[in-house]
Amino acid sequence: MKVNADLIKEMREDKSWSQEELAIAAGLNLRTVQRVEKEASASLQSKKSLAAALEIHVRDLDYEEISIIKRYEYKTIEIDPKEGFLTGVKRGELPDFSGALNVEGKDGWQVIQILTPDIAQGVWAGKSGRIVALLQREYTE
């Protein structure tokens, strides 16, 4: 079972104990203490022994996984090639989107996808029409 290895190591060091001294105090093998601190895993019996040696409740050694749920907001922007965005782009090449999107990037927006029928087909035909960029950014409540 998962245990809070950081707490075990911190409490051991607070007592100025080596891993071997903790093993003796807990009645465990030195290799067991080393494994617990390295892998954060221990049997229930080892967990009870460590808690007793460190003079804490066995539940204090429970591993608490921190769950962080990221939330995103989305938006789309349209880039009109007629506004000079495609100036200098040779036939068959993709335009440089970075200039048009850097303004959004300064506010934390990241490009998820660029949508245009020409690009979807794998060819930049230089047709007029709008290019749609799907953007996302992380937000906290």
Image (cartoon, rainbow, N blue to C red):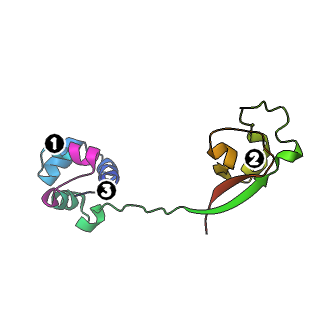
Q: Within the magenta stretch, is there residue 99?
A: no
x%, y% of residue 101?
A: 75, 47
Query: What residue would you read off at disc 2?
Result: 101
Residue type (three-letter) at the residue carrying disc 2: Leu
Magenta stretch?
Answer: 34-46
Which residue sits at x=71%, y=32%?
Answer: 92
Judge the density around disc 1: few (<14), some (14-19), many (≥20) Cα neighbours within 10 Å.
some
> Of callouts 2 and 3, which one flags the residue occurring earlier in the amino acid sequence?
3
Which residue sits at x=82%, y=39%?
Answer: 86
> Of callouts 3 and 1, which one flags the residue occurring earlier in the amino acid sequence?
3
Residue type (three-letter) at the residue carrying disc 1: Leu
Which residue sits at x=11%, y=52%?
Answer: 27
Query: What residue would you read off at disc 1?
Result: 30
Horizontal relation, residue 114 to residue 5: left or right? right
Q: Name the foreground residue: 85 vs 53.
A: 85
> Of callouts 2 and 1, which one flags the residue occurring earlier in the amino acid sequence?
1
Residue 84, visible in the rendered structure: yes
Query: What residue would you read off at disc 3?
Result: 4
Figure quadrant of the N terminus? bottom left
x%, y% of residue 67?
A: 43, 63
